[in-house]
Image (spheres, helix red, strand yellow):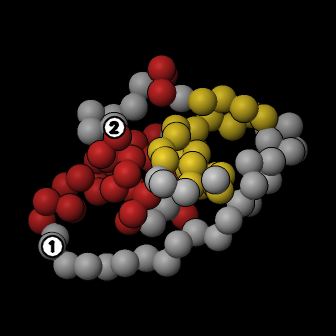
């Protein structure tokens, strides 16, 4: 199974949709996973899974706003704007 760390700025529509489905009312402290990356920086993230990939999405106020905005946009927009997948990133690396 692939493991990918994703920053808010690199979220695509598919991952954002997974986040909104898993956390429809937002995430709280119980959902946050904390770990240190290869540079010994503390990373806080929430986890979403697909059949073949685990995504750890770095949390912050911008992520919460993006999730809220995405939920609003999703209700108004039925067009398909597919975004390319994010390149593989190992948990030990940070982009």
Q: Position of residue 64 (x, y in %)?
A: 39, 42
Residue at the top extreme of this rendering: 30
Q: Position of residue 23 (x, y in %)?
A: 33, 37
The residue wearing badge 1 is: 78
Label 2's element?
loop
> What is the crowding at mark 1: few (fewer than 14 residues within 10 Å), some, or many (at least 20)?
few
Q: Nearer the viewer, residue 27 or 69?
A: 27
Q: Residue at x 34, y 56 (%)?
A: 17
The residue wearing badge 2 is: 23
Q: Is residue 2 above or below residue 24?
A: below
Q: Residue at x 27, y 39 (%)?
A: 24
Q: CA–CA distance between discs 2 and 1? A: 21 Å
Q: Earlier in the sequence, mark 2 or mark 1?
A: 2
Q: Residue at x 19, y 78 (%)?
A: 79
Q: Quadrant of the C terminus?
A: bottom right
Q: Is residue 14 above or below residue 8?
A: below
Residue 59 visible in this rendered orientation of the protein: no
Q: Position of residue 52 (x, y in %)?
A: 55, 57
Q: Is residue 20 above or below residue 35?
A: below
**On the picture, is 74 further left or further right than 39?**
left
- The quadrant where residue 43 appears: top right
Q: Is residue 45 above or below residue 63?
A: above
Residue 80 visible in this rendered orientation of the protein: yes
Q: Nearer the viewer, residue 61 or 17?
A: 17
User: Which of the labelled discs sits on residue 30, or is there none?
Assistant: none
**On the picture, is 7 further left or further right than 12?**
right
Residue at the right extreme of this rendering: 39
Q: Residue at x 43, y 58 (%)?
A: 15
């Amino acid at each position: 199974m692939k493991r990918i760390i994703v920053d808010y700025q690199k979220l695509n529509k598919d991952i954002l949709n997974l986040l909104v489905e898993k956390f429809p009312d937002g995430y709280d402290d119980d959902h946050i996973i904390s770990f240190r990356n290869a540079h010994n920086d503390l990373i806080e993230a929430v986890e979403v899974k697909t059949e073949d990939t685990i995504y750890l999405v770095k949390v912050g106020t911008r992520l919460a706003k993006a999730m809220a905005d995405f939920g609003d946009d999703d209700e108004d927009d039925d067009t398909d704007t597919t975004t390319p997948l994010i390149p593989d990133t190992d948990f030990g690396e940070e982009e």
